[in-house]
Image (cartoon, rainbow, N blue to C red):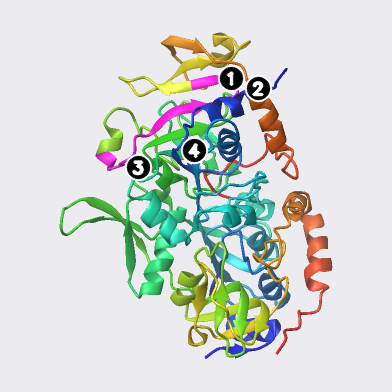
Amino acid sequence: MAEIVTLAEAIAAAVHDGDTVAMEGFTHLIPHAAGHEVIRQRRRELTVIRMTPDIIYDQLIGAGCARKLIFSWAGNPGVGSLHRFRDAVEHGWPGALELEEHSHAGMANRYQAGASGLPFAVLRGYRGTSLGAHTSGVAEISCPFTGEVLTAVSALRPDVAVVHAQQADRHGNVQFWGITGVQKEAVLAASRSVVTVEEIVDSLEPKPGGVVLPAWTVNYVAAVPGGAHPSYALGYSVRDNGFYLAWDEISRDREKFSAWLSEHVYGQAAVDGVR
Amino acid sequence: MTYTPDEMMAVTASRSLRDGMTCFVGIGLPSEAANLARAVHAPNLVLIYESGTIGAKPTELPLSIGDGILAETADAVVSVPEIFNYWLQPGRIDVGFLGAAQLDRYGNINTTVIGDCYDHPAVRLPGAGGAPEIAAACKEVIVVLRQSRRTFARRVEFVTSVGYGDGPGSRTRLGLPGGGPRQVITDLGVLRPDPDTLELVLAEIYPGVTVAQVRESTGWDLQVSPDLTQARPPADAELAALRALRATVPADPGPGGPAGGASG
């Protein structure tokens, strides 16, 4: 059953050193504030999973929280490279980063298999690419009915999923809408979950296309208004495209990045949640 | 009106899309050209972004595939597993419109690593995103990228998305249902696969560009189609619409910009 706690309490309780952590949100609803809290609590040796490890994971990687990255597209959307990610892969700074890389379709299916309690998912994909030779969790499989050769991808079962949503009610039922990405699958695939929300309301009003996570599928809910910034929460904020462009410059240089981290993450008190 | 090679590329790419088509759009150059097509000659073009937005009708150019304007103007917004499994995989989409970092003579795309060693790459690129399955499943694929010896390589060091594999028969052997890359649109001209060899050949050239110049900007011995034509320069209305669209973006990421497949 969901407990409504502060963000600092949620991360302390749910995310431990060495855990496999999935922070999802496909461009929309990226849990940036929760990512900062993981950095502030100085978690180490994490295996971090995310389809698009954009700025949020560039920060986690640069801060030294991650040992391994499972992903499908590592760039700054519409801007260019993720410089902290590249520095880790190309030069091992601040530490080596092991990669397990897939396609988006593969990752989406891996989460779906995890949420379904299955060991793998099947898709038409990967064949003829170099991906299979360089990553784990991909294998050929024959259809038992037609003999067609298809691709199997292994399930993702994170220790903890972290997502951001527009609303929760006082019982901890969660609702999010707009681009809903793969968050439902990530939460249901994970052993534990943390959800930050824009606001806690008395009762959830159904929204077109809205996804509801019943309170009993969620462990911790924390109210963190603006917790997706520079990503956004439809109906509450707009994507801060200017910050995505500015990140290119901030992240290009190790010292500039470290200074940014000191001022904007370590230097900030943990965000107080509303109980 | 005078125009730049990049503007000629965007206009030519936009002309490759017909009204009423369904188009799975990558961010960057493809998204710009697809939105230009919708503004100029293809108002009923159905834009589909991998964020799950189907029938998006943005009035400004999105910086990412998940900008709010895409969800707010879409006919339907579906989850990411659904967009790939129900919409892309069965082959419902007419055209996949992709960017690339590097491409070879069979239209195979690399957006993963530059350098011989995967574990110690000279340049680490963003990776696959949605591109491998877009390249596999769409009825046809159109690739848009600037042409140089670096980007048009004899052999890609990593096949992220399959074009024609190693030539005729490859796609069938691999069980790839879609038709593969039918056009590669660059800032110098348009390449199309030779009907027999499937090797990309120069099929259209832009005004003011020479065949020697295109061959010089290609990492393999580029052949020229016997039916080589010259592309029409941009019409004033096309240029005006393109410039109006570009004015809606915070800043142009420029040549150092997105190198990914469909993602962002």
Q: Secondary structure at mark 2?
A: helix
Image quarter of residue B85:
bottom left
Q: Nearer the viewer, mark 3 or mark 4?
A: 4
The C terminus of chain A, quarter of image: bottom right
Badge 3 and badge 4 both on one subunit: no
Q: Where residue B99 sits: x, y (%)?
A: 54, 37
Q: Where residue B116 sits: x, y (%)?
A: 50, 39
The amino acid type of the residue labelled 4 equals: Phe
Q: Nearer the viewer, mark 3 or mark 1?
A: 1
| Spatial CA span between label 3 and label 1 | 29 Å
Q: Which residues are magenta?
A: B173-190
- Residue B249, compared with residue A175, is above or below; it is above
- The 10 Å Cα crowd at callout 2, few under 14, some 14 to 19, many 20 or more, is some
Residue position for label 4: B97
Which residue is at the front of the view, B192 or A91?
B192
- Residue A24, compared with residue A7, is above or below; it is above
Which residue is at the front of the view, B209 or B23?
B23
Residue A29, can we see it? yes
| Spatial CA span between label 2 and label 3 | 33 Å
| Spatial CA span between label 2 and label 1 | 7 Å
- Residue B206, compared with residue B64, is above or below; it is above
Residue A128 circle label: 3
Q: Secondary structure at mark 3?
A: loop
Residue position for label 2: B5
Labels 2 and 3 touching (C-beta < 8 A): no
